[in-house]
Amino acid sequence: MGETGICGQTDKIKVSSANLHFGEEPPISGFNGSGTIFLTGCNLNCVYCQNYPISQMQNGREVSPLTLVDSMLRLQELGAHNINFVTPTHFNAQIADAIVAARDRGLKIPIVYNSSGYDRVEVLRMMEGLIEIYMPDMRYGDENAAQCYSSAADYPRINRAAVAEMHRQVGDLQTDENEVATRGLLIRHLVLPNNLSRSEEIFKFISEKISPDTYISLMSQYFPAFRANEYPQISRRITKKEYAVAKKLMEKYNLSNGWFQDEIL
């Protein structure tokens, strides 16, 4: 797979759901919930995707840009702290138009760009000024694993450039008096079995090239979903030891802001 760009150049956008969601990181969900819009499809082909009915099997319904704008405004009326677009990359053109239209109609809450991190810099620059909060994955520090499990050998290179551009646009994560996010970068890192995510390379990059103040969600929630059982190295959950090693690596690179998921193991 090569670099990704603006795809889905039609008037329609495919959506799985649009609801208040309380399962995001604390500053995203807050106390009222995140206005989460799950978009159908994905620009990666992860064999272990936990949301594969949406991302790989294309479950969802086509809606017009006007319907998308109405959904954003409805979520704001319900008290959402933000509008959270999940896997937006392949619908960036439509999303950009919808954000502008929604702002014109009174949308005031921040926009969260919740992506795989496999985003081309040129496309992210087109979103500048429209996105307040970037929440990308940093999934792989190794090209071989990226190719084997997500069909994206160039993921590490594209991902690092994308995260640097996101940080340039919005800076470190900022929160209000209620500790709800208002602007900035929040990185998710999913720990994979057998060190396939190469956590040390990723944390070293974040600390040295992005910011040691970066907020990181260190996720232990991996389980062998979708086609993962076809691949022996990812056909099990991670161990407590593997997660503890990842936490120690964050400490090694002085990354102290963020959240852990020890309770899941």
Image (tube, rainbow, N blue to C red):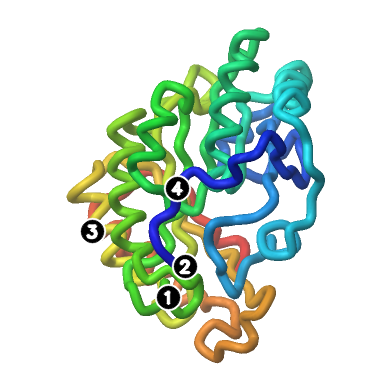
Residue at horizontal 36 percent and vertical 79 percent from the top: 144
Disc 4 to disc 1: CB gap under 8 Å: no
The three-letter code of the residue at mark 1 reads Gln
Rounded to the nearest angstrom, the CA distance separating label 4 from label 1 is 19 Å
Residue at horizontal 34 percent and vertical 71 percent from the top: 198
Rounded to the nearest angstrom, the CA distance separating label 3 from label 2 is 15 Å
Residue at horizontal 56 percent and vertical 88 percent from the top: 231
In what element is the residue under mark 1?
helix
Q: Quickly name the residue at label 3.
A: 204
The three-letter code of the residue at mark 3 reads Lys
Which mark is nearer the camera, 4 or 1? 4
Q: Quickly name the residue at label 2.
A: 191
The three-letter code of the residue at mark 2 reads Val
Which mark is nearer the camera, 1 or 2? 1
Rounded to the nearest angstrom, the CA distance separating label 3 from label 1 is 22 Å
Task: Identify the mark at residue 147; answer none if there is no mark.
Answer: 1
Residue 77: x and y, percent?
A: 76, 16
Give 212 or 263, whichever is nearer the viewer.
Answer: 212
Residue 71: x and y, percent?
A: 76, 26
First of labels 1, 2 by sequence position: 1
Residue 174: x and y, percent?
A: 41, 26
First of labels 3, 1 by sequence position: 1
First of labels 4, 3 by sequence position: 4
Q: Quickly name the residue at label 4.
A: 5
